Image (cartoon, helix red, strand yellow):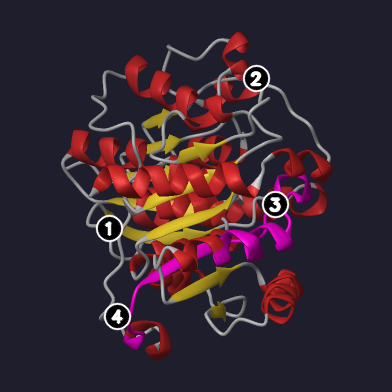
C-alpha cells in the first residue's frame, strides 16, 4: 500500500486553501489518506482537521540561512520514521526534495523548476516558463504530467460546529448573521473602515442581518474598534481575537461574507458561502479557480497591480451594495 506525504511550504492560509483540490486528488489517486507538511503559521492542524483525506499534519519552518540544514534534517527524520513511498512537493522549494532524496524515498515528485529537478525521481518537469503560471495552474500541470486525475478545481472546506474548540459565543449566537473581512496582510488590498460602516447601514435597512462578525487579525484590532466606535452600532461583533478555527465557525454561521482579498475570503469561498471579494488593486484573474464573487470598480482593469490603498476608494459603497442586493434577490 502506498504511503503518501505532500509538502507545501507557503505561509499564507489562502495559498494553502487553493491547493486543497490537488491534495485531495493525490489522495484519491493513491486511495489513501495523506500526511501533510506545512508551516505552523497556516494553523493547518486546526483548520483542516475535519477533512477526511488528511491523516496527519507536520509543521516545518522552512527557514533560510543558518537554519536551512536543521530544517532539512527535521524533514529527513520525519521521512525516515514514516517510510513514505511517495513525497509530493507542490512548489519549487528544494529542501523537501533534498531531504526525501537522502531518506531514500523512491518516488519524489514536484514541479522541478530550477534546481529542484536534480533531486526528483521523475523525468517530466514543468518548464522554466511555467514560473509565470499561478500556483493553482502549476499544481494542475504537475498532476497532469503525472497522470493524476483532478476531481475538482475548486477548494472545499468545512468545520464541525460541535467541535470542543469552538467558542460558545459564536456557536450560540442567534439571528441572521453576515461577516465582513476588514483587513489583509497587504495594506493596498484593504477597503476603508468608513466604507464598511456605510455598507452595513444600507444592508441593515434591507433587513439582511441582525449581527455582523468583523473578521481581522489581532494586529488589526484597531480597525474593528474604529468601525464599532465610529458607527455607534451594536450589531458589530469584534472577532479580532479568535483563531482560524473560530473564524471558520463564524463564517459557517454567516449567510454571506463581504471582504478584502485575503485569507478569510478564500476560506469563506471554500466553505461554499457566498463570498463577495472587494477588489480594486489586484487581478481578479487570479481568482478563477475559486468560488469568490468579485466586486470591482467601474473603471477596473484586470491583470494590473496598484499597490496603493488609495485605489480601493475607486470601489464605491453604492456599487458594492447594489451588487450584493442584486445577488441576494436573484437567489430567492
Q: Which residue is mark 2?
A: 114
**Residue 278 picture location, percent across and down:** 59, 45
| Residues at discs 4 and 1 in contact (Cβ within 8 Å) | no
Q: Are marks 3 and 4 in contact (CB under 8 Å)?
A: no
The quadrant in which the N terminus is found is top left
Q: Nearer the viewer, mark 1 or mark 3?
A: 3
**Residue marked by disc 3:** 191
Q: Which residues are magenta?
A: 172-201
Does dot 4 land on a helix, a strand or a loop?
A: loop
| Residue 239 in view of the camera | yes
Q: In the image, which disc is placed on residue 51?
A: 1
In the picture, residue 196 is in which quadrant? bottom right
Q: Position of residue 143 (x, y in %)?
A: 35, 23
Q: Using the image as rendered, state which of residue 26 and residue 176 is in the foreground.
A: 176
Q: Quadrant of residue 308?
A: top right
Question: How much space separates mark 4 and mark 1, taking CA atoms?
Answer: 13 Å
Residue 155: say if magenta.
no
Percent across and percent down for residue 228 are 67, 79
Q: For the residues carrying marks 3 and 4, which lies nearer the camera in this image?
A: 3
Tell which circle, 1 or 3, labels the residue nearer the N-terminal end.
1
Looking at the image, tell me whether mark 2 or mark 3 is earlier in sequence order. 2
Query: Label 4: which residue?
Result: 163
CA–CA distance in space, label 1 to label 2: 32 Å
Other residues around mark 1 within 10 Å, as few (<14) / some (14–19) / many (≥20): some
Discs 2, 4 touching: Cβ within 8 Å: no
Q: Residue at x 62, y 11 (%)?
A: 128
Amino acid at each position: 500500500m502506498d504511503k503518501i506525504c505532500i509538502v507545501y511550504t507557503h505561509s499564507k492560509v489562502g495559498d494553502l486553501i487553493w491547493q486543497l483540490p490537488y491534495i485531495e486528488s493525490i489522495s484519491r489517486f493513491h486511495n489513501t489518506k495523506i500526511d501533510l507538511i506545512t508551516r505552523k503559521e497556516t494553523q493547518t492542524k486546526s483548520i483542516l482537521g475535519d477533512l477526511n483525506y488528511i491523516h496527519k499534519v507536520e509543521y516545518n519552518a522552512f527557514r533560510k540561512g543558518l537554519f536551512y540544514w536543521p530544517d532539512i534534517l527535521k524533514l529527513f527524520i520525519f521521512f525516515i520514521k514514516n517510510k513514505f513511498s511517495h513525497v509530493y512537493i507542490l512548489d519549487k522549494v528544494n529542501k523537501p526534495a533534498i531531504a526525501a532524496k537522502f531518506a531514500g524515498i523512491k518516488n519524489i515528485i514536484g514541479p522541478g523548476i530550477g534546481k529542484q529537478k536534480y533531486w526528483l525521481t521523475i523525468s517530466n518537469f514543468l518548464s522554466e516558463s511555467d514560473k509565470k503560471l499561478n500556483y493553482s495552474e502549476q499544481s494542475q500541470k504537475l498532476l497532469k504530467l503525472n497522470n493524476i486525475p483532478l476531481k475538482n478545481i475548486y477548494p472545499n472546506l468545512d468545520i464541525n460546529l460541535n467541535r470542543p474548540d469552538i467558542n460558545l459565543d459564536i456557536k450560540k449566537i442567534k439571528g441572521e448573521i453576515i461577516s465582513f473581512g476588514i483587513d489583509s496582510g497587504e495594506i493596498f488590498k484593504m477597503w476603508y473602515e468608513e466604507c464598511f460602516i456605510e455598507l452595513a447601514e444600507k444592508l441593515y435597512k434591507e433587513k439582511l442581518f441582525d449581527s455582523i462578525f468583523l473578521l481581522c487579525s489581532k494586529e488589526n484590532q484597531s480597525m474593528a474598534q474604529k468601525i464599532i466606535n465610529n458607527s455607534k452600532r451594536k450589531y458589530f461583533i469584534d472577532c479580532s481575537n479568535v483563531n482560524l478555527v473560530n473564524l471558520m465557525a463564524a463564517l459557517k454561521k454567516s449567510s454571506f461574507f463581504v471582504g478584502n482579498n485575503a485569507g478569510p475570503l478564500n476560506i469563506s469561498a471554500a466553505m461554499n458561502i457566498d463570498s463577495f471579494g472587494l477588489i480594486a488593486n489586484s487581478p481578479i484573474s487570479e481568482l478563477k479557480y475559486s468560488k469568490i464573487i468579485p466586486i470591482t470598480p467601474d473603471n477596473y482593469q484586470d491583470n494590473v497591480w496598484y499597490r496603493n490603498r488609495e485605489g480601493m476608494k475607486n470601489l464605491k459603497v453604492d456599487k458594492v451594495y447594489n451588487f450584493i442586493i442584486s445577488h441576494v434577490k436573484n437567489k430567492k
